[in-house]
Image (tube, rainbow, N blue to C red):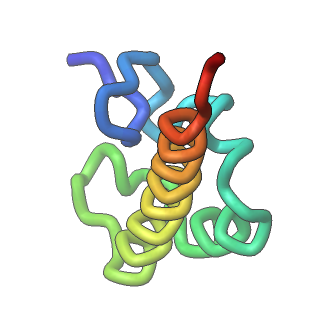
């Protein structure tokens, strides 16, 4: 089974210990990146038992990227061409 970036509709394959592809990871604020890694436990991908703290940090990172993508999409929709 292929592990893909956790941003919806992103098909990029990433190693299981990575939350998302590099393009999307770079959109995550540094403090949230630190939180994700602070709560990551080696082996959690194998035993499928991440901590609640990791899941919270991961959700926050994913939400941060989705918010940026939505803002970018809304800005593009408001452009008017003459």
Residue closest to the eye, 55 or 41: 55
70 left or right of 72 in image:
left
46 left or right of 24 in image:
left
65 left or right of 63 in image:
right
x and y percentages locating residue 22 in the rendered image = 66, 31
64 left or right of 12 in image:
right
Which quarter of the rendered picture does the N terminus lie within? top left
x and y percentages locating residue 5 in the rendered image = 42, 32
The quarter holding residue 48 reads bottom left
In the image, is residue 53 above or below residue 80?
Answer: below
The quarter holding residue 8 reads top left
The furthest residue to the front? 82
In the image, is residue 7 above or below residue 63?
Answer: above
Examine the rendering and report whether any part of residue 55 can be seen. Answer: yes
In the image, is residue 42 above or below residue 31?
Answer: above
Residue closest to the eye, 82 or 55: 82
The quarter holding residue 58 reads bottom left
Q: What residue is at 25 percent from the left and 64 percent from the top?
A: 49
Residue closest to the eye, 6 or 17: 6
Q: What residue is at 73 percent from the left and 63 percent from the top?
A: 29
Residue closest to the eye, 14 or 71: 71
Examine the rendering and report whether any part of residue 18 can be seen. Answer: no
In the image, is residue 42 above or below residue 80?
Answer: below
Q: What residue is at 59 percent from the left and 29 percent from the top?
A: 80
x and y percentages locating residue 42 in the rendered image = 51, 55
Which quarter of the rendered picture does the C terminus lie within? top right
The furthest residue to the bottom? 53
């Amino acid at each position: 089974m292929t592990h893909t970036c956790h941003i919806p509709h992103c098909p990029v394959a990433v190693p299981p210990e990575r939350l998302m592809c590099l393009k999307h990871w770079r959109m995550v604020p540094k403090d949230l990146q630190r939180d994700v890694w602070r709560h990551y436990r080696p082996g959690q991908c194998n035993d499928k038992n991440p901590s609640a703290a990791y899941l919270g940090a991961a959700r926050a990172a994913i939400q941060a990227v989705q918010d940026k993508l939505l803002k970018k999409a809304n800005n593009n929709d408001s452009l008017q061409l003459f």
